[in-house]
């Protein structure tokens, strides 16, 4: 594959995945677990901090292995082909395709509001499938076409959310909740707080933050990866954290916690309160914004997901066909089609909420393993090279990232056992498949 992406293309892919429609949907999934407005904001700040220190770990790995495949390559180099295979297997069947389905469903939830009749679940799913197949077709045209589309959608995303934040900050009034950071450790605030609930609340929060590392799946097609990839990682994490904290501050300033808890589309409620009589028109405008957000996220997920399939095909004969490139456009056509078709099947299989937690458990297990891989790699190669990035405060930061990831995995499992077990069962089905393909090759 040719290196055609610049550093700003890499930034657009990361931000395009992270800042999705989730910021207008996920806050209502957080409130049931944390009732305190202050702790809700703290949880979002913690999510941003965790993403940034995670990016320090990924920056080191990206400069060590600047190849297409991201996490797949890191896990293969550190733990072997079986672990890497199970990661790619989970991404293809659960994590990435599940996220595509969840975001596409969110697009459908907003799109039906523009229909001239009372639409239901089937219309939502029809819109979701249409989005997935249309964007898959766009990515078949080549990486340049896909990245240009992504750059345009990311620009629209930033403009849209900047509009919402600026309007909100200029319309400040008496707060709907008591946001008092000076007394966030008071008995009254802590009475309804628990570390377990914080962990469960962080699952949807980190899902909303997820994607900041996805530019690494295209590392082999990025110019000057040693400098471009860390730049995109750091800038994306900082920008997204600021935007997410500001948006949640506005939610909590204008909307009572109970309203956020029961709001299916909390962003719409926010603009209705801010804009008063013009709230209905503003809500429709926000609906258009969110649909653009969903398009950008789905496009980026499909763009990067096909590269995981491509990297997987090099080591696994059973999936060799997924990596076959179009000679003219250098595009993994079968990988793109597989991601699109399987995502469509998940749209009909699960709801948004189930998809959110169905994908959570496996994500954090592999994330912990990637962070811990830095410790193993440092012991294997103790000579520092000047052209590579090295995670500061070693081994503290990799340990923190790995331990927190395991805590999030445990929180997901304890509160959503059925979804976690289903996801784990699908991943474990990959073990006999891995050995079968090797035996067949021999």
Image (spheres, helix red, strand yellow):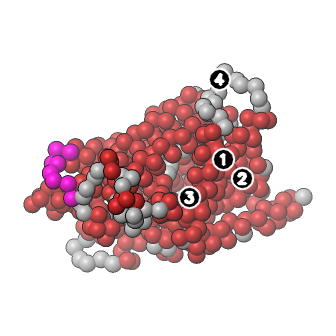
Q: Give the distance between the C-alpha atoms of the residues marked 1 and 4, in whole angstroms.
A: 21 Å
Q: Residues within 10 Å of mark 2 (few under 14, many from 20)?
A: many
Q: Is residue 203 left or right of residue 370?
A: left
Q: Is residue 434 magenta?
A: no
| Residue with the mark numbered 1 | 370
* Residue 387, disc: 4
Q: Give the distance between the C-alpha atoms of the residues marked 1 and 3, in whole angstroms.
A: 15 Å
- Mark nearest the camera among 3 and 4 is 3
x and y percentages locating residue 128 in the rendered image? 42, 66
The segment highlighted magenta reads 169-176
| Residue with the mark numbered 3 | 408
Q: Residue at x 75, y 44 (%)?
A: 78
Decide: marks 1, 4 in contact (CB < 8 A)?
no
Secondary structure under tag 1 reads helix
Q: Is residue 267 left or right of residue 89?
A: left
Q: Which of the two discs, 3 and 4, labels the residue nearer the N terminus?
A: 4
| In front of the other: 314 or 26 | 26
* Residue 84, disc: 2
Q: Which of the two discs, 1 and 3, labels the residue nearer the N terminus?
A: 1
């Amino acid at each position: 594959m040719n290196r055609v992406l610049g550093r700003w293309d890499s930034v657009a892919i990361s931000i395009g995945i992270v800042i999705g429609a989730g910021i207008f949907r996920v806050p209502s999934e957080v409130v049931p677990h944390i009732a305190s407005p202050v702790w809700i904001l703290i949880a979002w700040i913690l999510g941003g901090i965790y993403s940034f220190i995670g990016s320090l770990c990924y920056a080191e790995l990206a400069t060590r292995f600047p190849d297409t495949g991201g996490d797949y390559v890191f896990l293969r180099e550190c733990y072997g082909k079986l672990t890497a295979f199970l990661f790619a297997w989970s991404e293809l069947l659960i994590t990435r395709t599940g996220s595509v389905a969840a975001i596409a469903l969110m697009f459908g939830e907003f799109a039906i509001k523009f229909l001239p009749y009372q639409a239901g679940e089937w219309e939502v799913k029809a819109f979701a499938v249409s989005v997935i197949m249309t964007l898959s077709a766009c990515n078949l045209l080549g990486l340049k076409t896909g990245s240009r589309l992504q750059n345009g959608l990311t620009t629209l995303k930033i403009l849209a959310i900047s509009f919402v934040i600026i309007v909100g900050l200029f319309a400040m009034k008496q707060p709907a909740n008591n946001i008092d950071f000076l007394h966030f450790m008071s008995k009254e605030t802590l009475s309804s707080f628990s570390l377990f609930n914080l962990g469960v609340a962080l699952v949807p929060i980190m899902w909303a933050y997820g994607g900041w590392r996805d530019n690494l799946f295209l590392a082999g097609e990025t110019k000057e990866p040693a400098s471009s990839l860390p730049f995109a990682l750091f800038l994306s994490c900082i920008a997204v954290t600021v935007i997410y904290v500001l948006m949640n501050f506005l939610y909590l300033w204008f909307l009572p916690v109970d309203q956020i808890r029961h709001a299916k589309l909390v962003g719409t409620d926010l603009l209705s309160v801010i804009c008063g009589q013009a709230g209905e028109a503003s809500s429709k405008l926000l609906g258009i914004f969110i649909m653009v957000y969903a398009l950008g996220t789905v496009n980026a997920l499909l763009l990067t997901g096909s590269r995981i399939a491509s990297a997987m095909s090099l080591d696994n004969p059973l999936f060799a066909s997924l990596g076959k490139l179009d000679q003219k456009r250098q595009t993994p056509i079968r990988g793109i089609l597989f991601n699109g078709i399987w995502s469509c099947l998940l749209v009909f299989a699960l709801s948004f909420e189930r998809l959110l937690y169905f994908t959570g458990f496996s994500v954090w297990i592999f994330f912990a393993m990637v962070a811990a891989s830095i410790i193993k790699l440092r012991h294997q190669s103790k000579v520092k090279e000047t052209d590579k990035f090295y995670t500061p405060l070693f081994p503290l930061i990799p340990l923190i990232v790995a331990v927190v990831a395991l805590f999030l995995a445990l929180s997901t499992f304890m509160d959503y056992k059925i979804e976690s077990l289903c996801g784990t069962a699908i991943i474990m089905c990959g073990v006999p498949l891995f050995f079968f393909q090797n035996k067949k090759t021999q």
